Image (cartoon, helix red, strand yellow):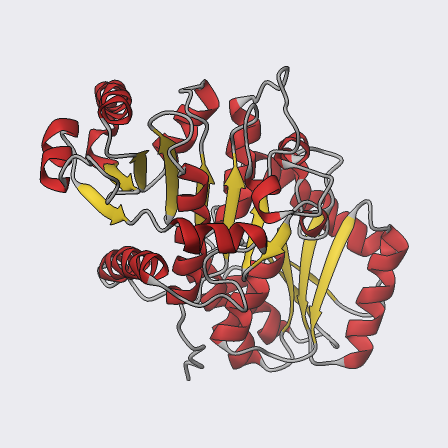
Amino acid sequence: MPQQSPLRVQEICPDPGVRAQFEDALKALGRDRVIYQAMAGYPSGTELARAIRALSPHVVFLSFEKLETALAVVRYLESEVEGMPVVGLYHEADSERMRQSMRVGARDFLMPPFGPAEVGAVLDDLRKVLRNAPLSYMATEQIYSFLPAKPGVGATTVAINTSVAFARETGHKVLLSDLDLACGVLRFLLKLPQDLSIVDALARAEDMDAFLWPQLVAERDGIDMLHSGGINPHAFLEIPQVQGLIDFARCNYGALFFDMSGNLERHSMYVMQESKQVFVVCNPDPGSLYQGREKIQVLSSMGLGGRLRAIVNRSDQALAVPAHRVAEFLGVPVAASLSDDTFEVSQSIQRAQSLFGSGLKPGRLSRQYREFATLLAAREQSAASERPAGDRELAVVS
């Protein structure tokens, strides 16, 4: 964590006096050192999970006023975020409470009266610890990349509508990012208002926080989007920047979708290696399929073969190659065949919306996207059922 980056602090304290004293101390330290979020009572497991996902805190200051409930909170935090530092808040000296809190993992404690000096000393110690042992959040594994076989196959349209349909099907918070820095059209198609782009986000990736992020993303049809801005011929993305952005987004979204350029740049390769599936978007014509097969062979030689799938866009064009022949030619399964519904697509573009935007009448193509999203969601649910449930209620152990 960069030294100048502010620590993100979550406080859980039902005592208004202790809470006010702690808040005053943090305000005195300044926002350049601390970003702060408070909960005035002990949360349920669902409430706590939402708070943690919203802030991605570096430390939790927790009141041990109600000992058993506080101990349950600590156990829950440890199950969700391995190594999450907890600092105890006590309204009076109580050796038994302190002993039990330390036993379950509280690394320090504060007791009134305390001020900026005492709180600052605790935070400085935590900063040193976190620099050597960063937190590992329960991050999403749902990362999907859309790679065009060649320019003009409609990969951006496919990425937009799949991500919106997936968000509606699953209820997940979804982020769609345009990584085509030379020819990205996400901003143009949806008339996104933000002047800032993914280039700006990547420049701040190492010290990204929950307060800066909303200035970078635009919302459309229920999902967040990062566009590529204008043409950036001299932009060069460093892998650590891309890694930092993905790490932040994975902890704050239920699924990430990437609209890739047609080139296999180093940063594009990194994103695809992080992806659960990579969809090569083709049209059913010989030139597009040939380019798609070339890219699939290159990616397969680099160890990505198991996660590659094809999407055939405009599959019912005249003289289209049949779907079974497409899979045979490309050497990978066809995940979706999408119709060439020019009217439905043009309507959505005129309104700067996805096919699922308000006021648009659903048609055959939007139904196909819903079916594809349902398939992706079913695979996610199947995989999740094999892991321990992450959204548990807090259990007070007597």
Query: Percent x, y for residue 338?
Result: 29, 48
- When the figure is inspected, residue 346 is found, relative to residue 398, above or below; the finding is above
Lateral position of residue 162 relative to residue 284, left or right: right
Which residue is located at x 54 percent, y 74 percent? Answer: 47
Q: Is residue 83 visible?
A: no
Q: Quadrant of the N terminus?
A: top right
- When the figure is inspected, residue 315 is found, relative to residue 107, above or below; the finding is above
Number of numbered discs on residues: 0
| Residue occupying the far front of the picture | 318
Which residue is located at x 72 percent, y 33 percent? Answer: 3
Query: Percent x, y for residue 313?
Result: 31, 41
Which residue is located at x 13 percent, y 29 percent? Answer: 331
Q: Is residue 81 visible?
A: yes
| Residue occupying the far right of the picture | 28
Q: Quadrant of the C terminus?
A: bottom left
Front in this rendered view, residue 91 or 240: 240
Query: Percent x, y for residue 20?
Result: 83, 72
Which residue is located at x 86 percent, y 55 percent? Answer: 116
Lateral position of residue 254 relative to residue 61, left or right: left
Residue 87 location, quadrant = bottom right
Front in this rendered view, residue 36 or 226: 226
Residue 226 location, quadrant = top right
- When the figure is inspected, residue 182 is found, relative to residue 4, above or below; the finding is above
Lateral position of residue 24 relative to residue 130, left or right: right
Query: Percent x, y for residue 151?
Result: 42, 26
